[in-house]
Amino acid sequence: MAKMTFSGEIIRGITKDNPILALVLGLCPLLACSTTLENAIGMSFAAWFVLFGSNILVSLLRKQIPPITRIPMFIIIICTFVTITDMVMEAYAPPLYDQLGIFVPLIVVNCIIIGRAEAYANKNDLKYSIADAIGIGIGFLIVLAILGFVRELFGTGGIALYGFEFNIPIEPITFMIVPGGAFMTIGILMAMTNYNNIRKQRKGVA
Amino acid sequence: MADVNLFTILMDGIFVKNFLVIQFLGLCSFLGVTKATESAKGMSMAVVFVMVMASIAAFVINTYILRTFGLTFLTTIAYIIVIAFLVQLVEFVIRKNSPGLYRSLGIYLPLITTNCAILGVVVLNTRLEYTFVQSVVHGIAAGIGYTLVMLFLAAMREKAEVLKVPTSIQGIPHAFFITTMYAMAFVNYFGVIPT
């Protein structure tokens, strides 16, 4: 493995280790919270905050946590941050909180966060763990935003984002808003990523 | 919300609000385990068991401990600990009784702890203020709905192995496309469009 750098770790989180497209983790919030772009952004910031907090704390405590009880410890650390997010969001952003529904407490069982704690923060320094959290967070945000954008645009015929709106002249396709549309969109997105990777590999060989 | 009849909860849990294809809960293990019907079956059984037990345990804890002592901010942590404990139990039982199944489930068995479907059932029970019987029925219904879709998809994916598809669609994207069809069926047959 090449030498680690701060910016390198951030970029790796977005591209090579993208939580959704490469690692296939955290699908539930991805599909459920991408009906509109606004929900998608709200969800990814909530998840980002939790990931950031848990990565920092796990990385700091990694010498103190005995290996045999590490998973329960991680879950309790993550739970703490989720409870904070839950309460803050309920108090300061009630409309978003209602929209995301049960997916706010369910950040606890988001595989991305526990996966990063186990695979990365538990083995690396604070500095790189922060970089990893930033990178993975951006990677998650990008995929969620793409999915939210596509589904809202075609499903409702326009985008409404924090008071800013624009419409396209098409008939809204309800299919994109119902669950089937979510599965199809992510399927196409993954197929496109695979296609791109295969093409790159072929070029590398030739 | 608390006076819904049991039949509605049962039907809602199985079809109308199916956990996998309508509410998107429990998708991580869904894609990993459905490669073979045998492991899908085992996984579903384990999930159903943990779901029902967790509904019971969570109701008791929520009503008699958390509410009584005003500790509702600990809800998430308490539920996760209960679920982790139950999963540990199931793991012991499966390892003892059917080692073959234990090997084929592999990493996904301990991962039931972090299966959103189970925490989802429990959190929904609390949010909708279901009574004890309603919680249990909801747990059973969610479990049956989960099993149904798991078995459908596993059977379909086994058959789809022999199909000739472009390399970039093979594997996970293909599974997603199959799931799209099921999700459409569930949405259309039961006339639900979640808003």
Image (tube, helix red, strand yellow):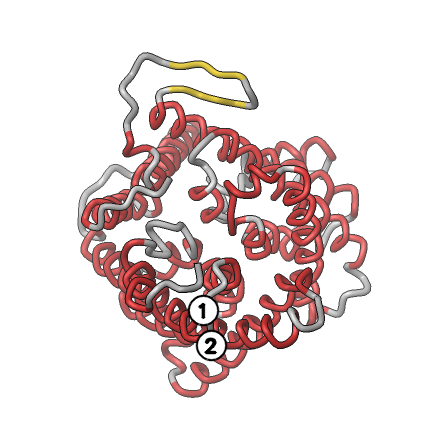
Relative vertical location of residue B111 with respect to residue A173 in this rendering, above or below: below
Q: Which residue is found at the position 39% from the left and 67% from the top?
A: B138
Relative vertical location of residue A120 with respect to residue A20 in this rendering, above or below: below
Q: Is residue A113 left or right of residue A165?
A: right
Where residue A190 appears, as percent x and y from the top left, is 39, 37
Q: Which chain letter goes with mark 1?
A: B
Q: Which chain letter goes with mark 2?
A: B
Where residue B140 appears, as percent x and y from the top left, is 36, 71
Q: Quadrant of the N terminus of chain B?
A: bottom left
List the residue tagged with mark 2: B53
Q: Is residue B156 left or right of residue B33?
A: left
List the residue tagged with mark 1: B106
Secondary structure type for disc 1: helix
Q: Which residue is found at the position 70% from the left and 65% from the top?
A: A73
Three-letter code for the amino acid on which mark 1 is drawn: Gly
**Does residue B36 appear in this view?**
no
Secondary structure type for disc 2: helix
